[in-house]
Image (spheres, rainbow, N blue to C red):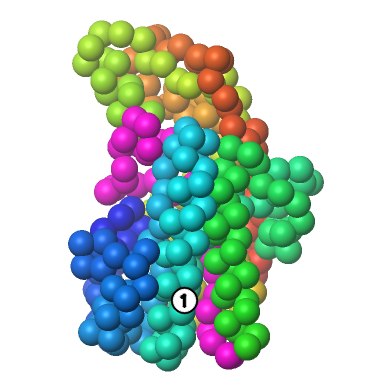
Amino acid sequence: GTGLVGNAIKSIKDKYSEHTFIFSSRLKCDLINYSDTYKYFSEIKPDYIIHLASIVGGLFKNMSHKVDMFDLNMRLNMNVLRCAHEHKVKKVVSCLSTCVFPDNVDYPINESMLHNGEPHDSNYGYAYSKRMLDVQSKLYRQQYNDNFICVIPTNIYGEHDNYSLENGHVIPALIHQCYLAKKENRPFIVKGSGEPLRQFIYSKDLAELMMWSLLEYNKWDNIILSVGEKDEISIKDLAITISKAFDYEDNIIFDTQYSNGQHKKTANNSLLLKYK
């Protein structure tokens, strides 16, 4: 409840005054620890859960801490769903990521392609932990008829993001890097060629869609929450946009000694548009 999407939901919660919201954090409960998680669920007695918690980072954290990204997220997700089942939670909406999709796939990707091949190596551990969250949700549905579903947003940006240069997502990390470059009167260095393409969704737009997924979406099928394919943008154009906002567009260097990561993961939002 204290991260990017959690804060976005907090900003719109007054629209849903018939519900009481509890915004959790790792200070209140260590979800990686089963006993802590069970005790916390017993205290708050949730009817519904929007499961946003995860161990996250940018491209280079995912590449250098693959075991941690897999192991910690697996334990966290297993505890959340197990405790939700044990406490008879009415519905759980878990948040995945487009990095879960196969690397070698025809674009645009849609919900049916989730397990049609291995994910890109740069996100391997994290992506598989998120795939297993989908598998776990499906198994709880099949065995216990639990209403556990998953949504798949594209890259998210907005207020309350993590602006870490090493572990932040691409937009906040680039904003921070450009800010420091101008402050220190040095080049704005962007890791990679800038050629990869991404779709970005604003955190408050996603918050509205998360609430819709919880309260109005009554299917058990995964659903992609995304802007359209035409709104895809290259990292290069993104960096230029950020540099213009800082009035620093003449000082960009794209450092090609760094990996680009996955070139594209274009998502199709036609299922969402069918309902919205």
Res. 186 image quadrant: top left
Spot occupied by residue 210 in the image (x, y as percentages of width and height)? 44, 68
User: Vertical placement of 62 versus 1: above or below?
Assistant: above
Q: Is residue 202 left or right of residue 115?
A: left
Q: Which residues are magenta?
A: 144-172
Q: Is residue 111 left or right of residue 104?
A: left
The kind of residue on which mark 1 rests is Leu
Spot occupied by residue 217 in the image (x, y as percentages of width and height)? 54, 78
What secondary structure is found at the residue carrying circle 1?
A: helix
User: Vertical placement of 8 versus 107: above or below?
Assistant: below
User: Vertical placement of 92 versus 245: above or below?
Assistant: below
Spot occupied by residue 209 in the image (x, y as percentages of width and height)? 46, 66
Q: Give the residue at mark 1.
A: 81
Residue 11 part of the magenta-drawn span = no
Q: Tell me what residue is drawn at x 60 percent, y 55 percent.
A: 128
Q: Tell me what residue is drawn at x 29 percent, y 65 percent.
A: 30
User: Vertical placement of 76 versus 61: above or below?
Assistant: below
